[in-house]
Image: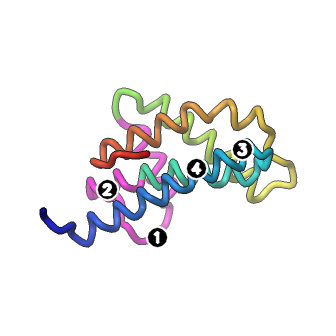
Amino acid sequence: MRALSHMEASIAQLAKKSDRNWILGKKEFEDGKHDFAANRLYYSVFQAIKCYGVERGRMAMERSVDVHAKAAEIVGEGKCGAFFRKSFVELRSLREKADYQPEMVERVEIEDVLENAEKIRLFHLEKAGIKSK
């Protein structure tokens, strides 16, 4: 069995973080902690997109300027691109509301994006060659 390269191992670790954040986000959602859920679910999807971006040489593993805008650009490509981009931007807006606005994220706001967020996450993990849980 071939050893993973440093980059492959880093992508695999990032995918595990995506899985863990998804599980935590869903739990926070079910527990009624919608601000926390919005944050964790967004980062789960972002990390999945980043796995794909890094694997394809389109993003760096390190933090860079406008990394979230780059993720929105990447998610907007392909036959599902416009739909995925719209859903990702909606999820990002919820994360920004949760983190920076005095208003609380409402359950219905997460319900509106949850199914699409999962599709985006799984799609990009699969395209990066990762099987998610």
The residue beneath circle 1 is 63
Callout 1: few (<14), some (14-19), or many (20+) C-alpha neighbours within 10 Å?
A: few
Q: CA distance from mark 1 to mark 2?
A: 13 Å
Could you tell me which residue is drawn at 39 percent across and 64 percent down? 13
Label 1 vs 4, first from the N-terminus: 4
Could you tell me which residue is drawn at 42 percent across and 33 percent down? 81
**Extreme-right residue of the structure:** 102
The residue beneath circle 3 is 29
Callout 3: few (<14), some (14-19), or many (20+) C-alpha neighbours within 10 Å?
A: many
The residue lying toward the viewer, choosing from 86 and 5, is 5
Amino acid type, mark 2: Arg
Label 2 vs 3, first from the N-terminus: 3
Tell us which disc is closer to us: 1 or 4: 4
The residue beneath circle 4 is 23
Could you tell me which residue is drawn at 35 percent across and 27 percent down? 79
Q: CA distance from mark 4 to mark 2?
A: 27 Å
Element at label 1: loop
In-image side of 76 versus 55 (left or right): right
Quick check: marks 3 and 1 in contact, CB under 8 Å?
Answer: no
Quick check: marks 3 and 4 in contact, CB under 8 Å?
Answer: no
The residue lying toward the viewer, choosing from 116 and 73, is 116
Quick check: marks 4 and 2 in contact, CB under 8 Å?
Answer: no
Segment tinted magenta in the rendering: 50-77
The residue beneath circle 2 is 58
In-image side of 128 versus 31 (left or right): left
Label 3 vs 4, first from the N-terminus: 4
Tell us which disc is closer to us: 3 or 1: 3
